[in-house]
Amino acid sequence: MTQAVKITREQVLVKLKEVYDPEIPVNVVDLGLIYDVRVSDKNEVYVQMTLTAAGCGMGPYIAQQAEWSISELEGVEDATVEMVFDPPWSPDLITEEGKQLLGM
């Protein structure tokens, strides 16, 4: 019997760096939109994320892209992305890499 691959939080974050808000040329991780990443013992991935604006119509699209991206990781049993707006996003959450990409 083969040992199952254990998915790590870091692997999930790397995959999430492939997901972009279509209106901003920076990935969701470097924009500071990812609030929480949890991986269960059964490789079920839970991500809590937000948007730059609560009324952003692209929210469902971005969440779906995030779920699809995580699901591409070998060994992932399930991927759930929950959209939350508390605490509200602020530009202070953008990583240094994100700030460089945005010219800040």
Image (spheres, rainbow, N blue to C red):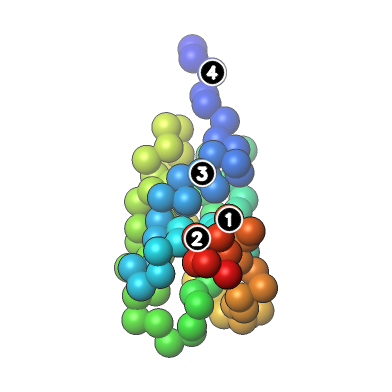
Point out the frontmost of discs 3 and 1: 1
Amino acid on which disc 2 is placed:
Leu
Please name which of the two marks, 3 or 4, marks the residue nearer to the observer: 3
Specify the farthest residue to the front: 103
- Residues at marks 4 and 1, CA–CA distance in whole angstroms: 36 Å
* Mark 2 and mark 1 residues within 8 Å of each other at the beta carbon: yes
Residue linked to disc 1 = 97
Alpha carbon separation for disc pair 2 and 4 = 40 Å
| Front position among marks 4 and 1 | 1
Q: Nearer the viewer, mark 2 or mark 4?
A: 2
Question: Identity of the amino acid at label 4?
Answer: Gln
* Mark 3 vs 2, N-terminal side: 3
* Residue 78 appears anywhere in the view: no
The residue at which mark 4 appears reads as 3
Q: Position of residue 51 (x, y in %)?
A: 49, 75
**Element carrying mark 2:** helix
Q: Nearer the viewer, mark 3 or mark 2?
A: 2
Marked residue nearer the N-terminal end (3 or 1)? 3
